Amino acid sequence: MVMGDVTTGTDVLVIGGGPGGYVAAIRAAQRDLDVTLVEKDAYGGTCLNHGCIPSKALINAADVAHEAAHAEGMGIHADPAVDAAALTDWKDDVVDQLTGGVEKLCKANGVTLIEGTAAFSGEHTARIAHGGDGQGMESVEFEHAIVATGSRPIEVPNFPFAEDAVWSSRDALGTETVPDRLVVVGAGYIGMELSTTFAKLGADVTVVEMLDDVLPIYDDDVTRVVRSRANELGIDFSFGEGARDLRETDDGDGDGDGDGIEIVTETEDGEESVYGADRVLVAVGREPVTDTLELDAAGLEPDENGFLKTDAQGQTDLDHVFAVGDVAGDPMLAHAASHEGIVAAETIAGEPAALDAQAIPSAVFTDPEIGTVGLTEAEADAEGFDPVVGEMPLRASGRALTMDETDGFVRIVADEPSGYVLGGQVVAPEASELIAEIGLAIEMGATLEDVATTVHTHPTLSEAVMEAAENAMGQAIHTLNR
């Protein structure tokens, strides 16, 4: 039976149930607005289902296996065996708990949930195609709309994700086997996180990158530690090369079934290289999902890259239509999407709200982790500040020594005349956690003295934040002052 085309109304229509969309929906509902959330795939979006959460689960598992196998220096000897299928089941259980929780939270807050694909049919209307055969269409009239449709992996020519041998990040996180040989195209944060993970799980990993270094948005002293650790794990890097072609090869077992593949790369000068592999992971970035929305029907036009331009409240060129998360451009981070969703919802509810982009941290879950927030020294200088920098090397941290993790540092950047904290860079275990303190300092307008005189638990990694602040003030105790 085909359902009839019905029309419903709502105060706020949220399109997309990822970390931007579901958070916006819940906050809008908490502000006594009638909210309808449309999700075509799975609640929690890419982050919970195919990105942040499953990747961190696999990263943690790989760390456990690697640490157990390399703890001879502590007098611990082990030879762990990785059951990739069981590992995948555990990872999926983690994901299921979180996605189920999102749906329950939305319902508990009074959000109306609709499964389907939404597209605009006018400035204040959208059409929703329900999933499944014979489920029909539905129209929704709205006062305000929040677009939160996220992003998808970018394909490169001759490497279609439809091929079994070609992985997107989603494919890599869903595999139940670890390939013997893995070629990773792209040395950005996704490429580096998954390269490290699969190397620790036993794969021979080669990373091909068009640029001349890993993680190109970070300074060399930040990436140097990560690159060095990756080399220790056996990861090979080929810089200045772009992936050009893919071809099947005999896998060497004599049966001619073409199980192996070769990746052909090319430099700017036309020099070719060939790499054998069992799988290739293409991780060259992500693009916004706006092409399915029929934006022109609402009077909206994305930029040349498909992003929707927004202001500090998340408003697009139409005052009643907002965009949050990856569709609104950088920073393409789940936690930024959630904050943008809150700002958009509160703005719609008539409350004063704005996004403070200066205090949004970013993290890369490599080995060791990278955490950054605010300004670097060079950026602070360019913006007219008189920056002072303090640093605490992990080799001087008692807690880092007890963890056998002494590669890295904590750095804090401040304005010297006022002492206000402007930014920080952390390369360390749990950098994603440590960076929160510096982010809070920026958000609240704290000074170096505020951070330095806050008593930190001993022995902890967080003491390094305090020591870095003291170092910037020229009064560090446990490291030499600059």
Image: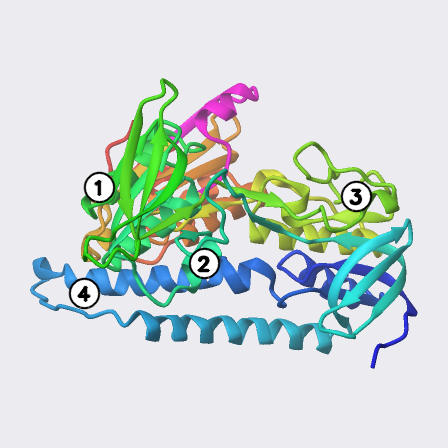
Three-letter code, disc 3:
Gln
Q: Earlier in the sequence, mark 2 or mark 3?
A: 2
Q: Is residue 350 left or right of residue 302?
A: right
Q: Is residue 91 left or right of residue 275?
A: right
Instruction: Between residue 72 and residue 466, name the one nearer to us.
Output: 72
Estimate the spatial distance between the alpha carbons at disc 1 and disc 4, rounded to whole Å: 19 Å
Q: Earlier in the sequence, mark 1 or mark 4?
A: 4
Residue labelled with disc 3:
315
Q: Position of residue 355 (x, y in %)?
A: 68, 44
184 is within the stretch colored magenta: no
Residue labelled with disc 2:
171
Instruction: Between residue 368 and residue 66, name the one nearer to us.
Output: 66
Question: Where 293 falls versus 302 (above or below)?
Answer: below
Residue labelled with disc 4:
68
Mark 2 or 3: the one toward you: 2
Mark 1 or 2: the one toward you: 2
Q: Give the extent of the magenta segment.
A: 372-389
Q: Is residue 130 visible?
A: yes
Is label 1 in a helix, a strand or a loop?
helix
Q: Mark 1 touching mark 2, by CB under 8 A?
A: no
**Quarter of the C terminus within the rendering:** top left
